Amino acid sequence: MKIKDIGEFGFIKRIKSGCLIRDTNVIRGIGDDCCVFKTSGETAILLTTDMLVERIHFSLSAISPYELGRKSLAVNLSDIAAMGATPREAVISIAIPAKVDLAVLDGFYQGMKSMAREFAVNLLGGDTTSSPEHLVINVALVGEAKEDEILYRSGSRVGDLIFLTGPVGASAAGLDLILKGREMEGWEDLIEAHHNPYPHIDAGRIIAGMKVANSLIDVSDGVAADLGHICTESKLGAILEERMIPTTGKFKDYCKRFHEDPNQLSLHGGEDYVLLGTVVPGSANDLRAALESKGCTFYQIGHMVAEPGLKLRNSEDSLETIEAKGWDHFT
Amino acid sequence: MKIKDIGEFGFIKRIKSGCLIRDTNVIRGIGDDCCVFKTSGETAILLTTDMLVERIHFSLSAISPYELGRKSLAVNLSDIAAMGATPREAVISIAIPAKVDLAVLDGFYQGMKSMAREFAVNLLGGDTTSSPEHLVINVALVGEAKEDEILYRSGSRVGDLIFLTGPVGASAAGLDLILKGREMEGWEDLIEAHHNPYPHIDAGRIIAGMKVANSLIDVSDGVAADLGHICTESKLGAILEERMIPTTGKFKDYCKRFHEDPNQLSLHGGEDYVLLGTVVPGSANDLRAALESKGCTFYQIGHMVAEPGLKLRNSEDSLETIEAKGWDHFT
């Protein structure tokens, strides 16, 4: 069955149920010109948006519709996590080509709703339209936070310790394996890291609430590129310790098995959606303890310096300059 | 010059200036994971989103990039107007195929910024990505309103007078002319109505502030379809008076010249982006006076009835049933 069999309004009716995850503060959900909601008092409002385009961000032959739904919301949740905020209400635009089966769309919305439930995010509306050829998804997500708890890319200071809230590289290794058409058996963890990333909302809230971090970003473009954003916005440089970059066992196995450069994948790969931040050195242990007590992780990977640029202390204990470049959609 | 010549971040730098239209309540604009802002105290927040897809919603050979930028924001502003609210902050996602010249994108953002300035709306960020073939634009727009002033599609009562805040049909006639490849000379007003619609934010604010209207929507799908939404949400029916449907002189000329059915275009055409609402009969004259005193217009076109369905009293003074159907992207 295709969407033409039920029409635009039939489709909206079909996906509507299960979209209101939490009714606190929601005044009007799906079914009017706008959705309407309140925030809880004296908070600041955050707004983020991300677009996923078929053949650019995903291939329906590689990712399942359910995972695509989860990931479409997850990448936006990760932006809210990167500010230390709490996600609240989302609207979804989707442009659907005639070829897409309704079962694909059902799976997509099931995935999106499952992610929404995990973070108490409402899906309050959106826009449904046709597309000449490619599936296009856009999510806009509103979050809230106390103004003095919000963490930006700017704000980092000389001497700050640089940390990650999870291992990196597995998502890039998963994509590498898919693009090179390698056998997937045994590497499911890497594929999963790429197709089903988990936003670090809890870690973001803990980091923001402790008020000891000076900057925060999520790793979407890659550690080097995203640390580059912090450096640029904070007008500083950074030194990374190669031996301290956290990666998983499967990731190490993959690099060894296929002779892939681990640094290339872990530092320049991207789409890990863990958090990358900087913290006052004297508070690093407190932050680690707070994160670990809630089941989150903390990996110290380097420190901020006054001299601009990124350097990596490699296995021979010498400093090599690394490029802050990550993914650019156009060059 | 194409976008690959300057890259994603070069492009963001290029479009960044002129995006912050009003700095009140804005905490962080373009350049972080989210934008951050406050609302003015005890208000409700509204969120709307609309996606425009090349070859579905527009053709770059027909609309100018400047008009496309204006229209992309205008259709979202119209949704905020339809709730009687005030527009505030916007984020824009754009998926750009390699073929698109940078001059097209410059024109697009100039148009969007011109519309933003007219309504004091900030462009606070978004997402820039590549596209395999078609240009796709998504705008998410936040507005605010006092909760007790917001107008919904539901809420209409039996006996309410139905009104429009402007003439209808010109946009559909403009599209008709373009699609049929007719000579444009002399019909610029119709093309303009289709390519450069003006959102009725001022009228929406006046209507909401007076608290005499029971329901409100903007005419995007067409008078019949959008009145159908009010009827469905309010569980009522409506009778329209054919002779009272406001259309422009050029529209009448066009229908006469090319033997087009005026009712088809004015009632089922859509994309007029005027407001359609219902008002308590005793307050209609007050509402008209308030709108006209601020340069807005008010056209009474029918009334709400208990019996479901839409009827049109035609030129022979007989009631004919009309379909509430308008544009459906899929059927």
Image (cartoon, coloured by chain):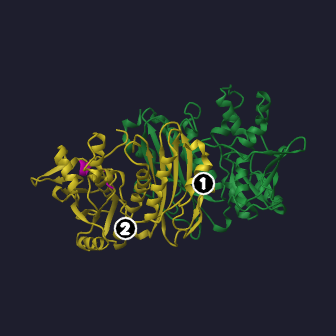
Chain colours: A yellow, B green
User: What's drawn in magenta, residue-wise?
Assistant: A265-272
Front-lying residue, B229 or A229: B229
Cα gap from disc 2 to disc 1, whole angstroms: 33 Å
Q: Is residue B109 visible?
A: no
**What is the secondary structure assignment of the residue under circle 2?**
helix
Q: Which is nearer the eye, B203 or A264?
A: A264
Chain containing the residue with disc 2: A
Q: Going by the picture, which residue comes out furthest to the right? A: B316
Say few, some or many: other residues with alpha carbon within 10 Å of mark 1 (under 14 / 14 to 19 / 20 or more): few
Which residue in the rendered view is the most extreme toward the left?
A316
Please provide percent x and percent y for residue B160.
80, 59
In the image: residue A20, left or right of residue A150:
right
Q: Position of residue A81 (x, y in %)?
A: 39, 62
Q: Quadrant of the N terminus of chain B?
A: top left
At label 2, which amino acid type do we have? Asp
Q: Which mark is residue A13?
A: 1
Question: Which labelled disc corresponds to residue A202?
Answer: 2
| Circle 2 crowding by C-alpha within 10 Å: few under 14, some 14–19, many from 20 | some
Up-down relation of residue A139 to residue B168 (above or below): below
Task: Let me know if residue B302 is in the magenta part.
Answer: no
